[in-house]
Every structure is written in structure tokens, then in C-alpha cells.
Amino acid sequence: MRASVMYGAGDVRIENLPDAAVVEPTDAVVRVTRACICGSDLWPYRTMEHSGTGRVMGHEAIGVVEAVGADVRTVKQSDLVVMPFAFSDGTCIFCHEALHTSCIHGGFFGTVDVAGAQAEAIRVPQADGTLVVLPVDEDDTLMPSLLTLSDVMGTGHHAAVAAKVDAGKTVAVVGDGAVGLCGVIAAKRLGAERIILLGRHPDRIGLAREFGATDVVSERGDEAVERVHELTDGHGVHSVLECVGLEQSELTAIEIARPGGAVGRVGVPQDETMPASRPAFFNNINISGGPAPVRAYIEELLPDILEGKIEPGRVFDRVIGLDDVPDGYRAMNDREAIKVMVKP
């Protein structure tokens, strides 16, 4: 099968690899019909040290089940399924607490140990606890939005949940990437009265406004903090969705939260320490979040997509074949595309 392999910063190749196969009795093999490139994939694309073996990239997919292990019970051959970015058994103590990304027997796709989904097929460990059968066919027009359930819509929702978004609250979303845009959808869906997007790219701002953003702050740093305070009578916002992961975005998130407010962090942190711990402490700011347990949210979000209440698939603004994945990385890295869908 063909797959996207990253060997180092800026070095993505399409190669022929051994076919995905069932290894453990709890595995399934899925023929990938839709995959995509994630903003978090850009971190290794910019910084990964050269590897002689590389790693198969991608952690978001929809596909058709081709084979299942002897112990798999909830999916079968020919089922169309969505694959969350983390695999989980669905039975451990943390899965029962809706923290599938902390599953005792789980892990993440697209790592050195577990091959990713920017490929013609993928082996899915813990298939019963991971895969969710979709009630549509593989060419349904809702496919882009359904694909977001594998990561960005669930991650945006997780940021909103962690930030305690609720009816009537004022919310800020830091970052105008696909996760931030889905965070706007999530905040609107949960009843936020006012949603302030911190972003500066016109195409993304336009989409955010259509999703429900009421205000836009394009400044950065101290100027952004000042502008948000101007918009909120000097108080700050109740909830902040931090969707970037850089020191500056984390600092801004904490500084624009009102006393007693909450910050939901879903941007993968690029530094070991979090800034502004003293202001966060003295303002009683709740800081939460982490890798989104998107498997826990699929059943909640799926009906809204099927009924057309939300359209997160609009974050995809480019569709490519597998051979064009290296250029897809370049386009996202150069901000020429918000999020790239891959049709192997």
C-alpha cells in the first residue's frame, strides 16, 4: 500500500509499504476513504530531526472495514467507520470516565510505534473501543463534517467544555486554525452569547463569523489583551479556548480571562512550562484541557452533523490525492490552506 512518510523537517514522501494487516485479535484493518493533515502535524514538519526510518503520518480518518480480528465484536467487514486520533479499549477505568486519551491500553496514531492514516489503509488497535460506525455511505455529502469528528470538531468541543462555556457567557477563542474555528462552532452550540476570535487571516475570520464569532481581535500580545479588555468593560472573558500551544497564545489566554474564569487548553504545548502562573493563581483562573478524548464526544456531536445543525467540514478548503500530501503540508505550513483533506 502507499502511505505518507515523514523523515524529517520538510521531508514528506509517498512510499510503498507492506499492506496493513490484523496483528492482534482486537485489531481491525480499515481502507481509508478520507484522511487529512492536522495543524499538529506541522510541528514535526517544522522541527523533526532526520530519521532513517521515518514515520507514517496522520491520525484522522474515515474508511471501510476490510478485516477484523477474532475478538472484534462491534464492527464488521464493509462497515463505514470514523477513527478518532487516539485508540482506546473503551473498557478501562479512564475510558469509563470519558478520558479515552488516557486509556490504559490505548495510544495515538501517526507515531513511531503506530502507523498513521495518511495511507491507503491502516491497522486500528482496540477496534471495538475506537471505531464508530457511520450511518451513511462513503460518498455522502456530509463526509467532510463527519471527518472532523476524528479530531478537530471534538477537540474544539473539548476546549469549550474545559473552559466551562455555557449559555450567556462571553468566550474568546485564541487561534484561527481548524481547531479554533471548530471551537467557535462549539461555543455557539453550547450557548455562548458573545464569541471573540483572536485571529488575523481574512479567510478564516470570514468563516469564523459565519460560524458565530461576534467580534474579531487581530492584534497580538499586549495589544490583543488590551483590545479584549476594551470589548469586555475591562473585565475579561468568562471562557478562553486556547487552540495554538505557543507560549504567547497561552499567556494571552490567561491574561484575557476574567477573575474566576476558565481556560481550556487544546493546543499541543510547545514549551515545558506554562506562563503567567502567578496571575492565574491570584485571579482564581481555572486552567484545564489536554488531548481531547474525541471518542467520548462522537455520539453527542454526530446527530448535529447528520441534521445539518453544524457544518465543521467547512474548515476543509483543499482536497488532494495521496500523491499530493507533501504539497498539502507545504500549503498548510505556508497558510495557503486552513485544513487539507486527503482522498487516497
Image: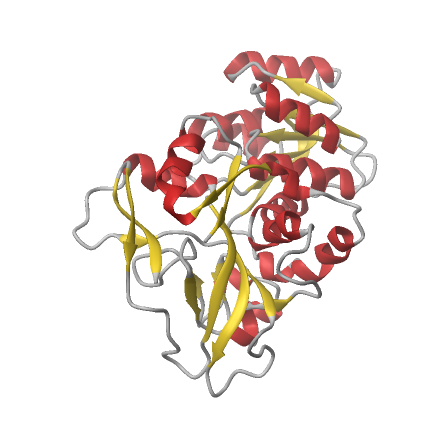
How many numbered dots are placed on residues in this image? 0
Depth check, front residue: 73 or 336: 336
Residue appearing at x 29%, y 58% in the figure: 112
- Outermost residue on the left side: it is 52
Q: Position of residue 28 (x, y in %)?
A: 47, 75
Q: Position of residue 176 (x, y in %)?
A: 57, 29
Depth check, front residue: 159 or 339: 339
Q: Position of residue 187 (x, y in %)?
A: 72, 39
Residue appearing at x 59%, y 61% in the figure: 295
Q: Say if 78 sits above or below 45 in the image.
A: below
Q: Is residue 144 left or right of residue 71?
A: right
Depth check, front residue: 169 or 258: 169
Residue appearing at x 48%, y 80% in the figure: 68
The reply to whether residue 28 is visible in this rendering is yes
- Residue 287: which quarter of the image? top right
Residue appearing at x 57%, y 37% in the figure: 178
Q: Say if 218 sits above or below 94 in the image.
A: above
